[in-house]
Image (cartoon, rainbow, N blue to C red):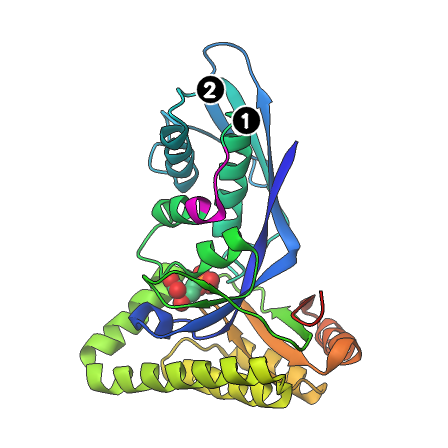
């Protein structure tokens, strides 16, 4: 049996979320990681086979790898010894692109292993295990939205609040194709913040204020306003130094094709742009414009009547 987990899109508040500001993220259910377990012969131990990377990890050989850390946590939780089994892993989520690939792959592994051991893990437990396995000091937004697979209003250290939008929101992501490291970008912001805390705390507060406005606008179904706030968030992300000329180019293509608003999503410095469009027709138009310009586009939607 196969276990899957979605990617994610941060709609508002990345980076500022590391400094205690709220953020809004939604699942990217169309792109998923999947894992399934095959029992193996006695003495083989647990092997994690990342098939896309052609990589095989063992708990003993790679104990610090995030997948091993997550698997160990599931074993501890289940009170089970290391089984003789291979966890196969595949993912359609581009890595290092701000789409939640790391949280989604760990989540799929946890679910597949727990089921193999006959243990049930709540979404909260999976989210906590995946958080502990992540490298660096992430805010926790990725594991939360991926494990719960619903839009969330997120403040670091507080219980996540599921988020409802009465209006259907259509999104397009455009991939710059440039890989970026979350750790490096977060560290760069930290350095600039520490050099001038008052200035940067002001930027983060401005981002937090617009995230709150965005929640209100989403609840009211005022999508034009949501789009404006995405544009404003993009400018602030450029101001704190996580932009990239290629991201600005994708934002311009999306806006010229009729998007209500567009911004970088996730770490920035490359990775993906996200645009909010006017309905499914607007979504198709923006995706087409990005594709014609030579970029990979992904479409997703959330909210509305379910
Ligand atoms: O790894 P990404 O691209 O999804 O970025 C994570 C979002 C940040 O706010 C930049 C970092 C964090 O831990 O929240």
Identify the mark at residue 83; answer none if there is no mark.
2
Q: Which residues are magenta?
A: 120-126
Q: Which residue is mark 1?
A: 116
Residue drawn at (57%, 60%) of the image: 150
Q: Residue 11 appears at what percent x and percent y? A: 53, 73
Screen quadrant of the N terminus: top right
Ligand 1 quadrant assignment: bottom left
Identify the mark at residue 266; answer none if there is no mark.
none
* Between discs 1 and 2, the one toward the N terminus: 2
Q: Find out whether the residues at labels 1 and 2 contact each other: C-beta distance under 8 Å.
A: yes
Residue drawn at (30%, 66%) of the image: 187
Q: Residue 181 appears at what percent x and percent y? A: 41, 60
Distance between mark 1 and mark 2 Cα atoms = 9 Å
Q: Quadrant of residue 31?
A: bottom right
Q: Quadrant of residue 79?
A: top left
Q: Residue furthest top?
A: 42
Screen quadrant of the C terminus: bottom right
Q: Nearer the viewer, residue 153 or 60?
A: 153
Q: Nearer the viewer, residue 153 or 293?
A: 153
* Residue 60 visible, this angle: yes
For residue 78: magenta? Answer: no
Q: Is residue 112 above or below residue 252?
A: above
């Amino acid at each position: 049996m196969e276990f899957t987990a979605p990617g994610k899109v941060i709609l508002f508040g990345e980076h500022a979320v590391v400094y205690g500001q709220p953020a809004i993220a939604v699942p990217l259910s169309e792109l998923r990681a999947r894992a399934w377990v095959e029992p193996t012969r006695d003495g083989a131990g647990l092997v994690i086979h990342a098939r896309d990377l052609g990589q095989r990890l063992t708990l003993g050989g790679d104990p610090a790898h995030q997948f091993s850390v997550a698997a160990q946590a599931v074993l501890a939780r289940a009170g089970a010894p290391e089984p003789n089994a291979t966890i196969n892993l595949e993912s359609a989520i581009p890595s290092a692109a701000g789409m939640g690939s790391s949280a989604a792959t760990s989540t799929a592994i946890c679910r597949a292993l727990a089921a193999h051991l006959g243990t049930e893990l709540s979404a909260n437990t999976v989210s906590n295990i995946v958080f502990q396995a992540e490298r660096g000091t992430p805010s926790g937004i990725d594991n939360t939205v991926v494990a719960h697979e619903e839009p969330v209003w997120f403040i670091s250290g507080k219980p996540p609040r599921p988020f409802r939008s009465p209006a259907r929101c259509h999104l397009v992501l455009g991939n710059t194709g440039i890989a970026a490291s979350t750790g490096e970008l977060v560290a760069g912001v930290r350095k600039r913040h520490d050099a001038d805390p008052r200035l940067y705390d002001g930027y983060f507060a401005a981002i937090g204020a617009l995230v709150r406005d965005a929640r209100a606008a989403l609840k009211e179904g005022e999508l034009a306003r949501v789009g404006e706030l995405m544009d404003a968030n993009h400018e602030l992300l450029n101001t704190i130094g996580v932009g990239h000329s290629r991201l600005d180019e994708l934002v311009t293509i999306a806006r010229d094709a009729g998007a209500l608003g567009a911004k970088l999503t996730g770490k920035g410095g490359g990775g993906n742009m996200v645009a909010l469009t006017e309905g499914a027709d607007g979504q198709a138009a923006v995706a087409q414009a990005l594709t014609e310009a030579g970029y990979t586009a992904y479409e997703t939607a959330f909210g509305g009547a379910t």
